[in-house]
Structures are given as structure tokens and as C-alpha cells.
Amino acid sequence: MFSTRHLRDLTLRRATHTPGQHHLSAASGLVCANGRVYVMADDEHHLAVFDDAHTHGRTVRLFEGTLPSGMKARKKRKADCETLALLPGGVLPTDNVLLTLGSGSRPRRCRGAWIVLDAEGRPRRPARQIDLVPLYEPLRKHFDDLNIEGAFVSGREFVLLQRGHAGGSPNASVHYALGCVLAWLFDGADAPVALRLRRHRLGSVAGVPLGFTDGAALPGGRWVFTAVAEATDDSVADGACVGSVVGVMSAQGELLARHAMPNDEKIEGIDARLRRGRIEFCVVTDADDPRIASRLLRGSVGM
């Protein structure tokens, strides 16, 4: 176990798109770059951008349409974007790009979007939407209950994380050649074919299996992940969260470390750096309650 420090609640400017709610309540994907914090919430059609630790965040539209305010109705219509990944400049014909992907757990959730960041890290509208069906259909041969919860770039690879649950679908990492992913996104090439698929055993907390919620690359092909033990047996229904962990995988997919969060908060997004032999990270939380603001936390763990 380790300690975390609360950096801020993810509050939004008053002139927000959801009347009466001035915060993110279901943060699911996190990127820290350009001195800014970018957050995707799985019940939003907007990206949230926080310029510093004090001011309220602003939102940038990624998907068309207005979501209903009621929790059940919103859940049926949301894009369910659980991931946020930074596609770095230098491999693109443009500046950095933020990419978010729907979970694939329902037909409506098979869409994603990408948006270009300018040289100072400000999103340049409009966002471009993506049909994820060509990418996800081959994965359904391996997963009865597809649920993509993480995405990140690791060297020359693009990695998706499939979240397992007590109903039987496994935790897995799906690895693609980054160049093929970029050609699909930006040049109209066919959807990429996975280089390899690895299943991962993450263990459990209080008898509840852990499932991936996000990941981030580390040097040398290693990667860090977040996982939660949520008492549910499918990819759509929420359950009680009995614990969360931050863990480390080797470049070969071996579990190197697993560190328990100090409380039962549900952590859903991570950004990490390796400094002086320790992993310094930020995570965002999801309380599964629209009345409660998601939180941005900071912590560090050993390798």
C-alpha cells in the first residue's frame, strides 16, 4: 500500500454543457502534457482540459448530440469513452493528437474521436470521429464481453487493454504496430491487425477479481496499469468497488508489482513517469455517482 495526495476536484466552468452539474463525475482517461491535464469521462461527449491546478476546467466537444441528465438514460446513449491516449508529435504529419476510444461493450459504444493539439497544447477544433467496428470486430473472437478500458503508446506499439470481470472475460493487452494504427487513423488504411494478444492474471481484492481500467507506458517496454475490483459480472452494469491497485508489467507481459490504493476509491485513468527509480503518477477517480466530483490524485511507487 502507498499514500496519495489529493491535487484537485475536477470542477468545470459554470458555463458548462450539462445544466446543474459543474464537475466531471465519471473520469475515465487521463493525459498530463504541455503543462495541462486532459481528462475524458465515460458519460460525456466532451473532453475536459485543465490549464492549472486551480482554475476550473473547460470542455471541448468531441461527439454530436446532447446527453440526457438522468443517469440511466445517459448511460444508454453515451459513447462510453474509457480511454485517452497521446499520439506523440514526430511520428505524425501534424502536432500531437489526443485519441479517445469507446469501450465497444455495446453497438453505440463503437466510436471514437481524435483532436489535434497545437504547439502549446490547446485543442484545435473540430474533432474527427472514428468508426471502431473494423478495429473491434476481430477482438470479439477472443472476448465474449469486449470492454476496452485503456490505450497507450509504448515505443513503436499501440496497446489496448481489455478489462476482465467475474463473468469470465479475461484481462488482456492487445498490441498493434503504431505505424499501422496511424495509417488507419489518418491515411484511410484498413484497420490494423493485432501483433499479439496477451492474457493477464491480476489477482483479486476481498475475493473480487481485478480488472484493468487504464495503462501508461514506461521506458524499456514496461508499462504501468490501474485495476479495480468491482463486484459485477458483465461489462455494462456497475458494482461496488472493494479496492483499486496500481501495478507494473514487464515488456514480456509479466506482472512485476501490484500496489493497493489506501482506500476503496475507484481509479479509472493514469498518467505516469519514471524518475529516480520510482514511478510517479497521477490518477483520476470515478465515484459512479453524478453528484460526486471526480478527483485528481498524485502518488509514487517503487518498481
Image (cartoon, rainbow, N blue to C red):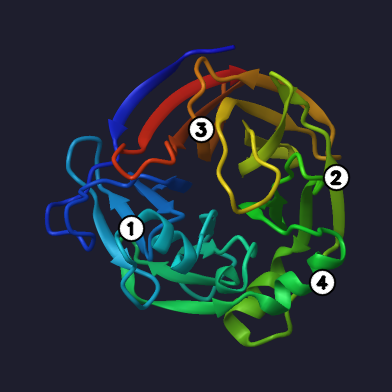
Residue type beneath disc 1: Gly
Spatial separation of the CA atoms under disc 3 and disc 2:
22 Å
Q: SS for tag 3?
A: loop
Q: Position of residue 247 (x, y in %)?
A: 67, 28
* Callout 4 amino acid: Pro
Residue lying at 51% horizontally and 60% vertically, measured from the top left: 80
The residue positioned 55% from the left and 73% from the top of the image is 108
Residue at (60% x, 71% y) in the render: 110
User: At 64% across and 73% down in the image, what residue appears?
Assistant: 182
Q: CA distance from mark 3 to mark 1?
A: 22 Å
Distance from the alpha carbon under mark 4 to that under mark 3: 30 Å
Decide if residue 85 is on the left or right side of residue 197.
left
For disc 1, the neighbor class at 10 Å (few under 14, some 14 to 19, many from 20) is few
Residue under label 2: 199
Quadrant location, the N terminus: top right
How would you rate the neighbour count of disc 2 (Cα within 10 Å): few for under 14, some for 14-19, many for 20 or more?
Answer: some
Secondary structure under the numbered disc 2 in the rendered image: strand
Report the mark closest to the observer, 3 or 2: 3
Residue 52 shows in the view: yes
Residue under label 3, please give it.
Answer: 266
Q: Secondary structure at mark 1?
A: loop
Looking at numbered disc 3 in the image, what kind of residue is underneath it?
Lys
Residue situated in front as seen by the camera: 152 or 102: 102
The Cα–Cα distance between marks 2 and 1, rounded to whole angstroms, is 36 Å
Residue tagged by mark 1?
70
Q: Contact, CB < 8 Å: mark 3 with mark 1? A: no
Residue pointed to by mark 4: 138
Precedes in sequence: disc 4 or disc 3: 4
Q: Earlier in the sequence, mark 2 or mark 1?
A: 1
Who comes first in sequence, dot 3 or dot 2?
A: 2
Image quadrant for the C terminus?
top right
